Image (spheres, coloured by chain):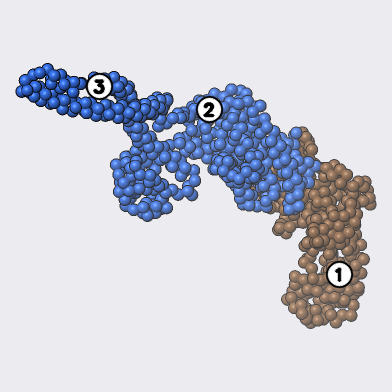
Amino acid sequence: MKKLIEIIKKNFRLLLRSKTSALIVLMGPLILMLLIGFAFNTTSLFDIKIGTYSSAYSELSDSVVQKLEDDQFRVVRIDSEEKCIDMVKAGDVHVCTVFPPNLNIRTSDKIIFYVDKSRLNFVYIILDRISSKIATKSTELSTALTNRLLTSITNVDTKLDTNKKISADLELSYSELSGLDITYSAANISSLKKEIKEANLSSSKESSLLSLVSSVETAYSDITTKITLISTVLSTVNTRLTGNINTAKEIEKSIKEVKDDINSIEVKDVARIVSPISTEIQPIAAESTNLSYTFPTLVLLVILFAGLLIGSTSVMEEKTSKAYFRNFITPTKGILFVLGQYVSSIMIVLLQLIIIFTVMLIVTQAKLDGLILLNVLLLLFLVGSIFVLFGMVIGYLFKTGETANMGAISIGALLLFFSNTILPIETLPTAIRSVVQFNPFILGEASLKKILLFNEGFSNIAIAVYILIGFVILLFALSYFTRELTKRNVS
Amino acid sequence: MTKDQPFIQLENISMQYGTSIVLDKIDLIVPYGEVFGIIGKSGSGKSTMLSIIVGFLKPTNGKVYFQSRNIYNDIQEVQAQMGFAAQEVSFYPRLTVKENLEYFGKMYNLDSKQIKQKIPELLRLVNLEGTEKLQGWKLSAGMQKRLDIACALIHEPKVLLLDEPTEDLDPALRLELLDLIKKINHEKNVTVVLTSHLLNEVEYICDRVAILHDHKIISIGKLWDLKDNYSKDHEIIVELQDRNNEEFIKMAKKIPSVKKVLVRQGKVYLYSNKGSDILKRMLAASVQTKKKFNVTSITLSKPSLEEVFESLTGKNNDAK
């Protein structure tokens, strides 16, 4: 133990006597953290330029452009589609939006966005913002159209009600017509004529009466003919009416079905038809600044690079030191030197973390209870140990400071790239993802988020902690063996 | 322990890196209390041999015994009794003299009280008094070398291994350091094993020498025995005022008993089994009235280690 303390004491003396190294090692990550913190404190986008082009702007495309012009976006109308695309390539505008000529709701033309996909996350953020702006306009249009449709349906419904009695009216008419009695008793004109003749009337009288009777007979004959005709017509009308009544009944049935259909539409509210599913995003953690959400990632980022660089630099300093050889010929076990180097480095990393957390707690005025703080410390200690030991392995493995630094930065970049920070790991192929999920950066970041943002206890991060402990043991053994294997290069 | 007992013993030691042989079946005994020199050309395996003795490297074959015990049975126990100063100084330049000694004292299992007592004594021995608070890098080359030796002596080792101790030092500092080694050997009764290719220094300081050539020890023994064994001749060194060496050499070669004539650094070296006769002739020649050669000095001695080394390893070597 005395030897270990002496090794740690010596390491700190050497670090503090090299003022530049001390400044870089201690202050570097803190300055980095401060700058990142300021930069990522908000998700707002500033000074985003959108180029738009259309061979013929319509009222609709103008209104979309107007919608885009707000505090975040600056819209530049460009003369040609090619120029617009070139401006994206040159970085003069971030997105080029091409509206089809005379865009209106009746056409199915599409609005085309030209983006520079090499800017990965940024492109998706911009597209998301623009899409949401256009979606708002689209919703407005959709609401207007739906409103019109609903009004028409309501009108139809009302009008159908007024036409509901057609069959009843027809039946009534049929009934009235059927009730008409057009029967009559036949008149015996020939008997009348016979009676006149037998009445011994003067011939003039008789002839005038017979003449009258003949005219009556003629008239009667006309009437009976017409009545017969009327009867025929009535019969035809009745037949037709019966047919019409059936048709009317069928129409009424159809109207009833239409009305039933209309009435079966439960939602008649325009807003609900346009957006039938309402969504609301509720944060699972308490509302906070963006910095709070990115804080676990930022802390891990600092530990990653600080750990790797401190680990590799301290070993390289020791290796290139004139005294390195003498340590090998003292009666001190090699593992003690590895342990001393590790403890010194992890102490520096922990010191940085304490400063970062203190500043963070002061700035955000957040309160962490003891248990959470204990879990955070345990987790960060483990993650820090992994990166420090990783750095130490690199330090023992490489021969010069330059190559060791390159090695440490490359490993850091690799761990960072295969994490959720640059691209979500869900975008990686399954085989790679199954390996990458054990990336200590990912394990540490996810666990830290669970503790800090969701206040979850140790049981929820236990598996990650056990994996991290496994990493620490493995890397410590690797550090020791690398030191022993490379000692031949010392003398 | 007496001087005749094997203190350190290397038995059939071979060292190989891949196909490259560095040491080949080395057998060596270092007696207690002596200053033992290992000489050889650069790359002959001198440093490797010391690294094996101190337990830093493990040989491919063979065993190393320290006080009749195999060192690999308890390497740390052995290392606690050995001090080592490599060719390059080995301490922390950013730590002070005192901090370096404290640190290595702790690494050699000393407690703070022991270290506190030893530091002034050690600094007096290596003549670094008053430099306790100076950082290592601020010391001169000679002082750094002495601090390095102090670091190797902090735990009062029984053996001090020195790899090319005077390398890169100026002549004055070399002599100073050689005297310090002698002093350590005498005052502290520390057995010293050193390597060097500077044969005059080895001759100056060592009691016994091993000559390493082609990765093997080709000769080992006390200095005078070596000289006697490998050359019964005397060495006559003649220095001329006008440095008319060519004429002198022509004349010397005509003397029947002169076996070999060499010129080194302007001086003429004659080797003969009748050294006293030659000396008389030279002295006579130097006092003649019509003297042909103006002799400023004549020395008669047994042949130097250099001569022995040359006769054993051949002339084309870089040992001086």
* Residue for badge 3: A182
Q: Earlier in the sequence, mark 2 or mark 3?
A: 3
Q: Are marks 3 and 1 on the same chain?
A: no
Residue A471, percent across and down? 69, 39
* Residue for badge 2: A284
How crowded is the residue under tag 2: few (<14 C-alpha within 10 Å), some, or many (20+)?
A: few
> Residue B94, labelled with which disc?
none
Q: Residue at x 79, y 63 (%)?
A: B41
* Residue for badge 1: B311
How crowded is the residue under tag 1: few (<14 C-alpha within 10 Å), some, or many (20+)?
A: few
Q: Chain of mark 1?
A: B
Q: Amino acid at mark 1?
A: Ser
Residue A141 versus residue B182 in the image, above or below: above
Q: Amino acid at mark 2?
A: Ile
Query: In the rendered structure, are the residues bearing label 2 and label 3 in contact, judged by CB atoms less than 8 Å apart?
Result: no
**Chain B's shade in the image?**
brown
| Element class at badge 1 | helix
Residue A94, percent across and down? 41, 47
Q: Amino acid at mark 3?
A: Ile
Chain painted in blue in the figure = A
Query: In the rendered structure, are the residues bearing label 3 and label 1 in contact, judged by CB atoms less than 8 Å apart?
Result: no
Q: Is residue A345 visible?
A: no
